[in-house]
Image (cartoon, grey):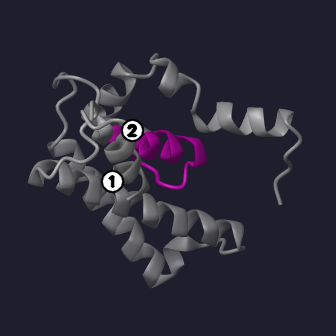
Amino acid sequence: HIARYLVGKFDPADRLGVRSERVADLNRLAVVNTIMNNEVVLLLAQRGGVADLEGVAYFRKLMQAIDQGLAWLEGHTDPERGDFDYRDIATICLWQHMLHYAVTPGLTNYRRIAARVERFAERPSVARTTPAVSLAEALAAGWSPG
């Protein structure tokens, strides 16, 4: 909602399609957001001391939803499709987060997603905001985890 508001106020041309009402665009964002939400719950559970995520039915259900979401996303991703847009930003954030925190195994099965992310990896806005770069900058500025 914040991105939509800011684009409406400061980029009425909506160059990245943030305010798109196309069903395909909304579906893609919904799937990406669901995957990311589930992955964050799993990550927080691990950090909270749950050693065996597979042993808890709730967490198994989240992992299954992540796998199903990634399979849907894989099937609806064209690595060569048009220009960079808001859905790419969301997908790149999701993908980089998943790679960085390694909560979800089997990401090598999603070649189309990986190829789409790789296609834009060298863009300054992408390269400068990976989890590793962001964490390094935060640490250099004096932030400490915990």
Residue 14 visible: yes
Label 2 Cα neighbours within 10 Å, binned few <14 / some 14-19 / many ≥20: few
Label 1 Cα neighbours within 10 Å, binned few <14 / some 14-19 / many ≥20: many
Find the residue positioned furthest to the bottom.
Answer: 57
Residue 96 lies in magenta, yes or no? Answer: yes
Amino acid type at image mark 1: Val
Which residues fall within the magenta stretch? 93-110
Q: Nearer the viewer, residue 101 or 60?
A: 101
Q: Which label number is shown at residue 32?
A: 1
Q: Which residue is mark 2?
A: 10
Q: Tell me residue 45's x, y (percent).
A: 62, 72
Q: Quadrant of residue 9?
A: top left
Amino acid type at image mark 2: Phe
Q: Quadrant of the N terminus?
A: bottom left
Q: Nearer the viewer, residue 111 or 90?
A: 90
Quick check: 125 above or below 101? above
Residue depicted at x 35% and y 43% = 7
Residue 102 lies in magenta, yes or no? Answer: yes
Residue depicted at x 89% and y 41% = 142
